[in-house]
Amino acid sequence: MKQKKIVVINDLLPTEQPGAASIAYRLFNKFNTESSARYWTTSVQPTSLIHENPHISLLRISEDAARQSSRGLKHKLKCEYLSLTPLIWLYKQVRAEKPSVAIVQQIGNRFPRTLIPLMNFMGVKVICTLHDFSWLVPRKLFPKDLKISSSELLEKGKLEGNRQADNSIIREGSLLRYTVFRFRLLINRQILNHCASVIAISQLQAEIYKSFGFKISAVIPNNVEKCSCKLPLETRRENTILLFAGRSYAKGLEEVFEITQENPSTILYLAGPSDLPERAKSKLNPDQFYYFGNLEPSKLYELLHKIGFVVVLSECFDVYPTITLEALSHGSLVLTNRNTGNSELVASIFPNLVINDIASLDFNALALMSTEIRDSMKFKEVQDRVTGDEMFLEYSRYVNRILNL
Ligand SMILES: [Zn+2]
């Protein structure tokens, strides 16, 4: 690779919210070992990651500013396009660091999307990755407005072009609301036209975006780091512990409570925002769940060695949940459903851990078999697939191609 500066941009650090931020941070670290890479992000809390790595530049934002995007459509639109403080900060960063290529991952909450045309005008080539459907429908409105949860849309054959997907995703509500959404789609398409490449992370996601007129250059599924945890000797795995890690909406939390209720010997571990324990209190006995707060990646990985299963029962089409990949990397089994884009990976493990009807789930039987499943060749094959270097190699290829233009 040419010695040109690469910057990876993401709204968040993985310490604040894993998922896309973990993927962005992994890409940054990989590029940083090959050449001089930078990571530009925001944080509400001071973070130890900054002191460890001088290549990370961070815009500190207030708690109030961080909450803006959840205050309804008007604030959401401001965060997506018109937040001036981050735009000015990014402008100064570009002037100071002069990167050649920007790999833009998850943005639109704290960094406005208008950073893409801004960087393009300043001579930086942009590769942008779409991690979910937030460029189609505002993320905070999931799943009410995202109707592609319906199983027929999960089958590619049924996605008959623009009209059907359009009606399925943006329907109900007022004409004004519909017009705002259509206008927003138009702006988002225009913004992405300023990118040298637009990457999707699953084939079906790419097709849905294309049906809305977006130009997708490639599909690059996410990979995560291979387990390199140095665990205390006494670490033991408890197969009847379930872990739910993530936000409280659209991720199947109610079903996770049901599984826990149905199996009294099960303990539920919760990691994520502070409304998780509130929700759990109303459904479970206090001794049936434990809340860890937001976990730093290293702490999350440690936990993944102590539990039997991670539960990812997304309510609407969840493009490629990172927690599934991280769980597999650190040897935890994953109970998931067909709504998740990486359920195909899980489906190749025997027995089937892709459940679409939790009523028929015999969790105790699965827990008894879990050590055997973990030791199977199939499981190890899947682990190798999710921890490979394909994602980084593909991005490297795109970066090189752009630099050679
Ligand atoms: Zn590990």
Image (cartoon, grey):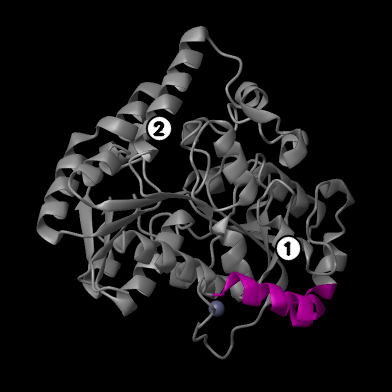
Mark closer to the chain start, 2 or 1: 2
Spot the residue most to the top: 175
Q: Which residues are magenta?
A: 369-388
Residue 300 coordinates in the image, percent (x, y): 51, 68
Q: Which mark is residue 188?
A: 2
The answer to whether residue 80 is left or right of residue 248 is left
The answer to whether residue 106 is left or right of residue 159 is left
Q: Residue at label 1?
A: 346
The answer to whether residue 330 is left or right of residue 217 is right
Residue 15 coordinates in the image, percent (x, y): 38, 61
Tell me what residue is drawn at x 60 percent, y 76 percent: 305
Amino acid residing under circle 2? Asn
Q: Is residue 379 magenta?
A: yes
Q: Is residue 212 magenta?
A: no
Tell me what residue is drawn at x 36 percent, y 49 percent: 196
Tell me what residue is drawn at x 58 percent, y 26 percent: 145
Quarter of the picture for ligand 1? bottom right
Spot the residue most to the bottom: 233
